[in-house]
Image (cartoon, helix red, strand yellow):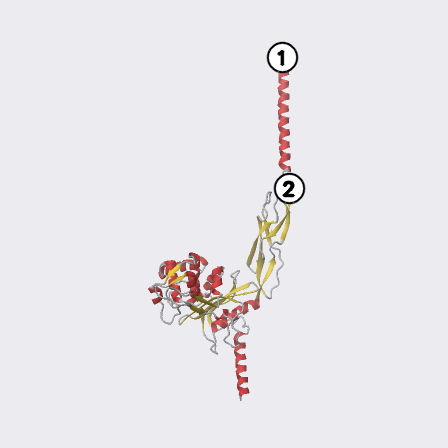
């Protein structure tokens, strides 16, 4: 009987694992979410989408915008004081960090509990510190969203508290995340599995685990272990109206992906649909796409002879300034079409590493470019100017001689005439 129970339990676990973490086809990569998208973090190219431009409620994924505005506008060592409104305006049931009225914390501490623990009170404190009020901060959020390129996003608060006029799309959130992940401070915080606030003037030490289970190392073999070893962030979200949301970023062998799932529900077995959809999306990207190196940094593109340069330096190697890697479908073979190379009209002198042109590849509609550099100093030849000076000197001597000759002839004529 015990063996029978063990066998049934084992089969059930295997069923759960295979039904949730096997690679999904491109038709059902995110079956538990109403809207989703997967993009290449480097180029922004969309690799998969489902209702990606449909208006959705973002819940606490909003907080990535609050974070990046704080990072860009403030010194994170500055101190913020928690206001009455920042604490008391958090609705019942929304996550908080137990911040106390008149408590003083650094902006860096507030950012950590904002992004790791998804603390709504921290979002309010940051908005008041950066923007003066939640309302004026929301204006900053919308301005920034427009600058990033979002076309269907409108924020009304810094935390993601539900508001019918607080909305975005999976596509817009992917753009915002791509922008945020270029910031090293943001990247560092969203990848943390936990954070700690040291004792303050009002409260004892507090410790929080990340609400994003993809970044929390976990060695158990249960079906609800959602740890994804390539995950490097980013942010969870939930409200009754938005349902479960998750923005994820991952990096595998320098191939970085960003996924967004919104409006997610639980699976038939009660597992986290947002986590499973996110893992399936990321796996879909790595199973179907790859990055290939087209050129290495310092590769010689060609050699040119520079006019008016010295004999020892006139033969100049043109080298590439950066690696060029391209996003490609796994089934594609690299098209060996020659790149477009543009080199400036070169004349000495030229400094080593000076930009002398540009190289451009076009792969599947995406342009990949790099500057071209001079491999060494090119010195100006002194021979040319010297020859020119000699010629000019000879010409002057000739002119003087001719003038002298003409003058002598004229004097002789005058003398004969006088005689």
Q: Nearer the viewer, residue 349 or 30?
A: 349
Q: Measured from the top left, where is residue 91 in percent x and y? A: 36, 69
- Determine the CA span between mark 1 and mark 2: 59 Å
Q: Looking at the rendering, which quadrant does residue 142 occupy?
A: bottom left
Whether residue 152 appears in this view of the structure is no
Q: Which residue is mark 2?
A: 310
- In the picture, the disc for residue 393 is none
Q: Is residue 387 above or below residue 8?
A: above
Residue that extends furthest to the right in the rendered view of this protein? 311
Q: Measured from the top left, where is residue 118 in percent x and y? A: 42, 67
Q: Looking at the rendering, which quadrant does residue 364 occupy?
A: bottom right
Q: Measured from the top left, where is residue 283 in percent x and y? A: 54, 69
User: Residue at point 58% right, 59% down?
Assistant: 325
Say what secondary structure mark 1 lies in.
helix
Q: Nearer the viewer, residue 362 or 348?
A: 348
Say what secondary structure mark 2 lies in.
loop
Residue that extends furthest to the bottom in the rendered view of this protein? 1
Q: Are marks 1 and 2 in contact (CB under 8 Å)?
A: no
Q: Measured from the top left, where is residue 255 in percent x and y? A: 55, 63
Q: Which residue is mark 1?
A: 417
The nearer-to-camera label among 1 and 2 is 2
């Amino acid at each position: 009987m015990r063996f029978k129970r063990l066998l049934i339990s084992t089969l059930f676990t295997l069923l759960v694992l295979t039904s949730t973490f096997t690679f999904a086809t491109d038709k059902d990569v995110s079956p538990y979410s109403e809207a989703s998208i997967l993009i290449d973090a480097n180029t922004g190219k969309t690799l998969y989408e489902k209702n990606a431009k449909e208006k959705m409620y973002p819940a606490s994924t909003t907080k990535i915008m609050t974070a990046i505005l704080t990072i860009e506008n403030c010194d994170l060592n500055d101190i913020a004081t928690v206001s009455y409104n920042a604490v008391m305006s958090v609705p019942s049931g929304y996550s908080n960090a137990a911040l106390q009225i008149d408590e003083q914390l650094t902006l860096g501490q507030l950012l950590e509990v904002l992004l790791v623990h998804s603390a709504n009170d921290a979002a309010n404190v940051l908005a008041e510190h950066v923007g003066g009020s939640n309302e004026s901060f929301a204006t900053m959020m919308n301005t920034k969203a427009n600058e990033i390129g979002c076309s269907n996003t409108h924020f009304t608060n810094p935390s993601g508290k539900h508001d019918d006029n607080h909305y975005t799309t999976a596509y817009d959130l992917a753009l915002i995340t791509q922008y945020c992940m270029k910031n090293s401070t943001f990247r560092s915080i969203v990848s943390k599995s936990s954070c700690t606030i040291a004792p303050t003037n009002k409260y004892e030490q507090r410790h929080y685990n990340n609400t994003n289970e993809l970044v929390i190392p976990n060695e158990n073999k249960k079906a609800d272990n959602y740890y994804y070893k390539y995950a490097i962030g980013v942010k969870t979200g939930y409200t009754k109206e938005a349902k479960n949301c998750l923005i994820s970023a991952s990096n595998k062998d320098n191939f970085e992906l960003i996924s967004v799932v919104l409006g997610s529900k639980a699976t038939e077995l009660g597992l986290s649909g947002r986590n499973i959809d996110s893992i399936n999306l990321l796996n879909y990207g790595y199973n179907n796409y790859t990055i290939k190196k087209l050129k290495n940094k310092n590769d010689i593109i060609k050699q040119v002879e520079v006019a008016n340069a010295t004999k020892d330096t006139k033969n100049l190697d043109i080298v590439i300034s950066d690696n060029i890697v391209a996003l490609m479908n796994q089934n594609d073979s690299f098209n060996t079409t020659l790149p477009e190379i543009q080199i400036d009209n070169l004349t000495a002198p030229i400094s080593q590493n000076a930009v002398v042109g540009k190289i451009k590849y076009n792969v599947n509609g995406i342009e990949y470019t790099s500057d071209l550099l001079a491999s060494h100093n090119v010195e100006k030849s002194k021979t040319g100017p010297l020859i020119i000076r000699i010629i000019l000197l000879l010409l002057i001597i000739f002119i003087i001689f001719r003038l002298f000759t003409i003058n002598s002839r004229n004097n002789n004529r005058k003398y004969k005439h006088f005689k």
